[in-house]
Amino acid sequence: MKKPVLTIEEAEPPKPLRADRPPTSGFVIVVDGHFKSEFDNVETAELAGRKLKAAYPMLQVQIYDAVNEVRTLLT
């Protein structure tokens, strides 16, 4: 199978993130031990995590700080 030729105007599409490797930057919502959504700052990650926890209280929701490699449990 031949690869399509990219022109200068077309940038190479970003590679998909692997689900089995933690991200290296930003903040991520971890739901029941699985990485889900990635955010640029902790405030938006925590807001999204709290909305998810309010809708589904039985879930274990954490915020993962990729730079410091720290998980914070939302209660």
Image (cartoon, rainbow, N blue to C red):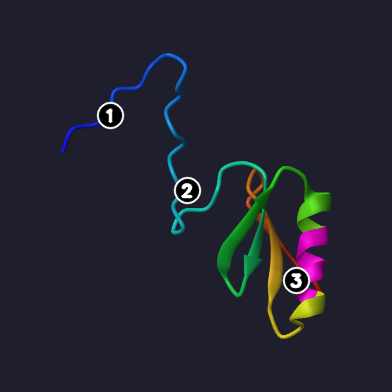
Q: Amino acid at mark 2?
A: Leu
Residue 50 belongs to magenta span: yes
Q: Residue furthest top?
A: 8
Give, as a single range, the part of the protein colored magenta: 47-53
Q: Nearer the viewer, residue 8 or 32?
A: 8
Residue in view at x 83 percent, y 60 percent: 47
Tag 1's secondary structure?
A: loop
Residue 41 belongs to magenta span: no
Identify the mark at residue 52; answer none if there is no mark. 3
Could you tell me how far apart the alpha carbons at marks 1 and 2 are, in whole angstroms? 22 Å
Q: Which class describes the residues within 10 Å of circle 2: few (<14), some (14-19), or many (20+)?
A: few
Could you tell me how far apart the alpha carbons at marks 3 and 1 are, in whole angstroms? 40 Å
Where is residue 75 shown, x and y percent of the image?
Answer: 82, 75
Q: Which class describes the residues within 10 Å of circle 1: few (<14), some (14-19), or many (20+)?
A: few
Identify the mark at residue 4; answer none if there is no mark. 1
Q: Is residue 54 left or right of residue 4?
A: right
Where is residue 25 shown, x and y percent of the image?
Answer: 62, 41
Q: Nearer the viewer, mark 1 or mark 2?
A: 1
The answer to whether mark 3 and mark 1 are in CB contact below 8 A is no
